[in-house]
Image (tube, helix red, strand yellow):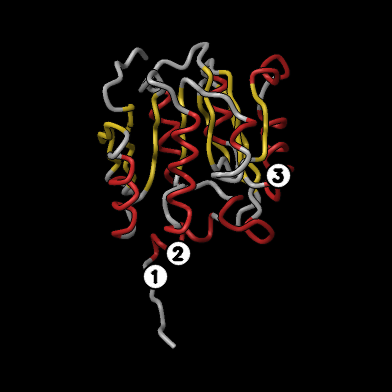
């Protein structure tokens, strides 16, 4: 059996996943996100990629006012909540098993007058896509990590996007296979890195369908 050693920084990062909640402030709103690593694992904790993407959106990386936005693999819902606070009409999605937890974070953090701007829906990539229309913006934080999901994820992104859709993928590049998914994307989209946060090793990639004109 191999013994894995962690430095203090890594240990601190792992410990925070076991905290019952994490608190943030975006768009001049305090946001308290519940976490549940014990029962839901990776779907119920806040990853660095989500926080960096929220910072990018808050800084005006793209215009969200009045735009329709869907978040894939929303997990705790942090990115979608911030997008709604910034003026987007948001649909957050995840697997059925994570939805009640996701709904709790949405309802606990969005002001009552903004709840109509956000819906929570089940979405297993590659399935039931006929139940979804297209969106102005597609976002995902740390959703590129399981090679067996890559084809279905790409199929989903293609279904949800039009010639005017902007896709933002925030992620750590952990393995060579992560580059493989980006190469798959490049067969259909122009993909460029628009931000790299060296402190937490998170990249944000922006994708536009090949030949489209960006209007956001």
Q: Quadrant of residue 32?
A: top right
Q: Nearer the viewer, mark 1 or mark 3?
A: 3
Looking at the picture, does residue 9 appear above or below residue 160?
Answer: below
Element type at marker 2? Answer: helix
Image quadrant occupied by the N terminus: bottom left
| Disc on res. 20 | none
Circle 3 Cα neighbour tier, 10 Å, few/some/many (<14 / 14–19 / ≥20): some
Q: Is residue 123 left or right of residue 143?
A: right
Q: Which residue is mark 1?
A: 6
Query: Farthest residue in the front direction?
Result: 130
Q: Which residue is mark 2?
A: 11
Looking at the picture, does residue 17 appear above or below residue 115?
Answer: below
Measure the alpha-carbon separation of dots 1 and 2. 6 Å
- As rendered, which of 122 and 35 lies closer to the eye? 122
Q: Position of residue 84 (x, y in %)?
A: 57, 22
Sequence-earlier tag: 1 or 3: 1
Element type at marker 1? Answer: loop
Q: Which residue is mark 3?
A: 101
- As rendered, which of 33 and 196 lies closer to the eye? 196
Q: Name the residue located 41 percent from the left edge and 62 percent from the top edge.
A: 10
């Amino acid at each position: 059996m191999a013994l894995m050693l962690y430095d203090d920084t890594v240990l601190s990062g792992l410990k925070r996943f076991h905290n019952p909640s994490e608190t943030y402030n975006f768009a001049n709103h305090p946001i308290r996100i519940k976490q549940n690593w014990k029962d839901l694992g990776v779907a119920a904790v806040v990853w660095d990629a989500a926080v960096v993407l929220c910072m990018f959106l808050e800084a005006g990386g793209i215009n969200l006012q009045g735009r329709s936005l869907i978040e894939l693999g929303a997990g705790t819902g942090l990115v979608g909540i911030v997008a709604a606070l910034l003026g987007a009409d948001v649909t957050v999605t995840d697997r059925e098993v994570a939805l009640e937890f996701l709904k709790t974070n949405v309802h606990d953090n969005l002001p009552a007058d903004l709840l109509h701007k956000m819906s929570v829906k089940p979405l297993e990539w590659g399935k039931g896509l006929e139940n979804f229309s297209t969106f102005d913006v597609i976002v995902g934080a740390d959703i590129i990590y399981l090679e067996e999901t890559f084809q279905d994820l790409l199929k989903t992104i293609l279904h949800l996007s039009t010639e005017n859709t902007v896709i933002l993928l925030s992620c750590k590049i952990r393995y060579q296979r992560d580059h493989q998914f980006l190469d798959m994307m490049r067969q259909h989209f122009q993909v460029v890195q628009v931000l790299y946060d060296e402190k937490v090793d998170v990249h944000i990639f922006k994708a536009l369908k090949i030949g489209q004109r960006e209007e956001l």
